[in-house]
Image (cartoon, rainbow, N blue to C red):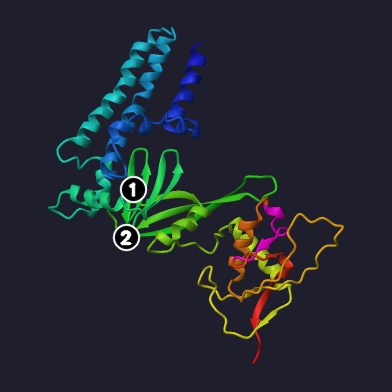
Amino acid sequence: MDILITLFYILFSICVVYPPAEFVSAGFTIAQLFDNWLGSENTNFIGYHMKRTTITVLIHSMLPAGYLATLWCGGVRGEWMLSAAAAVLIIPFYMGYKMVRWWEYDKSKHPVVKALLPYVTPGIDWRVVASNFNVEFRSVDKVSITLSATSKFVVTHSWLVKVTQYGINLVKQRDCALVATATDSHNLSTSGEDEVQYVNIEAIPSRDDIKKFTFRISTTSLRDLQPRLDRAIRVPEHISLLPTLIERFVDVFKQHVEQNPVYQIDQEVELCIGCMQNPADVKLDRRCVPPPPHIEDEHLPCQQCNCRVLWCTACMARWWVARAGGPPASWLAARGSCPVCRAPFCLRDVCPARRAAS
């Protein structure tokens, strides 16, 4: 009986410390259970995480005592239980003492407050820096990336923040460099079409009074993160980032387009109206032969597009994917429609556009 209770409690403890997705969706996490007491993270980020880390440490420290209580309720008795209870109760009492120290006086010994102290000017209360941070955190342009059920990475206009179970790492963007240190890839399907890559990134502060920290995100999240950073993430030459599925399709799409005849244009090459960065370099010119009447085609027959050259190959490929649907293996065999006049076209109709030599 005691073995079953032990196995059950070990599983329960793991779910409390590292809650699985089922616990999170059911609202059975420490932050969700004490939501009314913690308040709003968006309104008072620093105060919220001061309370959250306190209650998390307290509950985790009580797990060993909870194990003995569970054994007792399960009918397990023994002379050793009294001494074991005295031993395990030392942990929550010690943590309770530390938490009193965290919150006494000006609360400057709290782990969350300690992360702020390097940016507190002597003679100024740390609450001033906390208030300024809370105001910036409420901005709608921040980026929050979930790292695990118990941690996340947040980027605001000026700050980089890693939230963990027992505290936070906080550094200003101007005082930190982000460096990719390792990658690992995983196939989500046997075909390899849904491959995901994760990157380990180390945040290296330029100040000695700030601790460096690491976090792990997917390459997709990394690309979403880059535009929000003042400094680009440094990727050493020996580390290769996996392109996304769309980026790989764009490369294949370009290879097929280059095999089609060149469409000569007389006017000046304009910028692509999709990205406004690359020159417009493709023209939809009907080249395919319609199928015989006795052969049924699930797609609409191709039509001649009379629009001028407006799109680059990459944007046309992304538009094609948006209209294709279905599994990635069938994208090239699909049909697209002109983004402007909606004329149906196939891949043979996408011709590279070049200005005629004068």
Horizontal and vertical percent position of residue 308:
61, 76
- Is residue 14 positioned above or below 161 on the image? above
CA distance for labels 1 and 2: 13 Å
Q: Are marks 1 and 2 in contact (CB under 8 Å)?
A: no
Q: Which residues are magenta?
A: 328-339
Horizontal and vertical percent position of residue 93:
26, 24
Q: Quadrant of residue 108?
A: top left
Q: Which residue is mark 2?
A: 175
Q: Nearer the viewer, residue 272 or 129?
A: 272
**Label 1: element kind:** strand
Horizontal and vertical percent position of residue 301:
75, 62
Q: Residue at image x 34%, y 16%? A: 85
Give amino acid for label 1: Asn
Marking on residue 97: none
| Residue farthest toward the right in the current orientation of the protein | 294
Q: Residue at image x 85%, y 57%? A: 295
Instruction: Inspect this view and state whether residue 73 appears.
Output: yes
**Label 2: element kind:** helix
Q: Which residue is mark 1?
A: 169
Q: Quadrant of residue 334?
A: bottom right
Q: Is residue 289 left or right of residue 179?
A: right
Sequence-first tag of 1 and 2? 1
Q: Residue at image x 28%, y 29%? A: 95
Confirm whether the magenta stretch covers residue 240. Answer: no
